[in-house]
Amino acid sequence: MSTLGLSLAGRWQSRLGRSGLLLLAALLLAGSLLLDIASGPAQLSIAQVLHSLLQGEGGDGVIVWQIRLPVALMALAVGAALGVSGLVMQTVLHNPLASSYTLGISAGAGFGAALFIVAGSSLGLAEAWGLPLCALGFAFVAGSAVLLIGRHRGGNAESYVLAGIALLFLFQALLSLLQYLAAPDALAQIVFWLFGSLYKSGWHAVGLMWLTLLLGCGVLARDAWHFTALSLSDERAASLGIAVSRLRWRALALVSLLTGVAVAFVGTIGFVGLIAPHMARMLLGEDHRLLIPGAALSGALLLSLASVLGKWLSPGGLIPIGIVTALIGLPFFLLLILRSKGGQ
Amino acid sequence: MLQLTQLSVRLAGQTVLHGLDLASGPQGSITCLLGPNGCGKSTLLRTLAGQLAYGGSIRHASQPDWQHRQATLPAKVAWLPQDCGSNSRLSAVEVVLLGKLQTLGWRVPAQLQQQARQQLAQLGLSAVAQQPLCQLSGGQRQMVFLAQALMREPSILLLDEPISALDLQHQQQVLALIEQQTRQRNMLTIMVLHDLNAARRYSQHCWLLQQGRVLAAGATAEVMTPALLSQLYHTPISSITADDGFALFYHGRHAQPA
């Protein structure tokens, strides 16, 4: 990844500066947001969208404000949360393949939601709150398990990665079991939910997601220099006075929160948390003061574009977003791997 | 001066350091730590760097026992762990800036940037200041990390095998730099080395460690003798006097006469 990424970063950085790149990403994101609101069964023009946003709910404004805008804003927040989670996990575990998806936290949340779908209604809990709480709860269970098993096994980066992979397999197996045991209705709901959907998001969910994102990023940003130092190695970071274990625990706790809330509202979405950090690193280097917003913007952009693509492929908006991210994510990921090998 | 009294360290249920009683050289001098692999040299350095719990006492100057909290680097100590290579894309000047990690806020003040650049210039690395770490040679990388350690303005510098992975030219460069900076900043430098001749030439004080126990400690000229070194490494070591006046050690093929 190093030589190609460096030449690419070098050319763009010298023209725009790193802050300039962040600004460019933000502008692209704004464009994607407008496109996302414009696209759908009733195709609107960008001008109509801007008009509705400024003038409030009248005429087309209903579609924009009641349906499209919350979905589009949810895509931004979830994409950003997954991007930042992936970045932090890759830095803290020294593993370019780490993300809350590959290390079992998303799977844990998914299992929690599926468990609620199968058993929760019989307990009389309202779905609106019961399902997200269950998902969040199991996200923390998964996150805690990774931390405890990893620490027991030695407390270095490799132990946590192995623990995460074990949990991924565990929760996927349990999910399969639930799907096998579920009644047809519940099964359809689980499967649809597992593929991820932005359409279950009302304004309260959007608000909660944005709140979690801003709080989570705010807390992570305070450790930005520590993450930059940790990117050298555990020992180098310790030699600079950083308490590495505590930093790792803090980071994984925040990742569990961000991922848990995201999965609670939109289901499991893969690849965004894996790819967004690599995109950000290629363009911005290793300074985490820039990487944290960079990964957030990359993740938001990826999910927003996936939402647009999903609507273009199926105008009814019926393709779950998780499938779209897998469709664009996989070739993109292969491209990253192949180009980096060629660059060396 | 650093005074260690009955220092003992346990790792994974095993005692690694058995009640060490050691005194280093004074400030402005270099103390080297010699011993076979697995004797506890890195463990001792890590303990001095505050990474491990210990029994006994560690006292610097006439201060009371450090009793530092585990996994916290003491304020006036800089520690350079063994270099395991780095493919980081951070630039040299960014790495040096990290030396001031404890005081870095969101924005880096211009004065700190200037200090980092000056630190690199002092070590002759101005030309590579903006280059990423992964593109530097092993010797240059080691010197960048040395610059990072010096940014902490330490009074104690702990170096774990600083020249093991370097070619002869870079070995000389790094050692000369360490010697110069130790004198200029009046630091106490404790250095783990495998190269006996480098140890003889650059250190004033010497600790010989064998299986977690002190074999000998004192002035380098007195401690680094063929007899003691042969005993330390369980292998015949001989010496001749080189033309710079220092002893030159070599691995003898025949046992040293008693």
Image: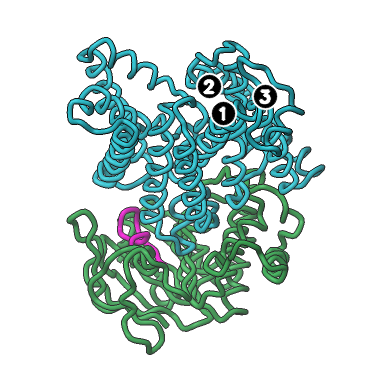
Chain colours: A cyan, B green
Q: Name the residue under label 3.
A: A38
Q: What's under tag 1, amino acid-wise?
A: Leu
Q: Which chain carries label 1?
A: A
Q: Which residue is drawn at 55% across and 13% down?
A: A316
Figure quadrant of the C terminus of chain A: top right
Q: Which residue is drawn at 67% across and 69% down?
A: B112
Q: Residue furthest front?
A: A58
Q: Name the residue under label 1.
A: A303
Residues under numbered marks 2 and 3 in contact, where contact means CB atoms less than 8 Å apart: no
Q: Distance between the residues labelled 3 and 1?
A: 16 Å
Q: Residue furthest bottom?
A: B62
**Where, by quadrant of the figure, is residue A313 drawn?**
top right
Q: Mark 2 points at which residue?
A: A325
Q: Position of residue B45 (x, y in %)?
A: 38, 65
Element under disc 2? helix
Q: Earlier in the sequence, mark 3 or mark 1?
A: 3
Binning the other alpha carbons within 10 Å of mark 1 as few (below 14), some (14 to 19) or many (20 upward) gives many
Is A37 rendered above or below residue B68?
above
Q: Where is residue A293 in the image (x, y as percent from the top left)?
A: 60, 46
The total of numbered circles placed on residues is 3
Element under disc 1? helix
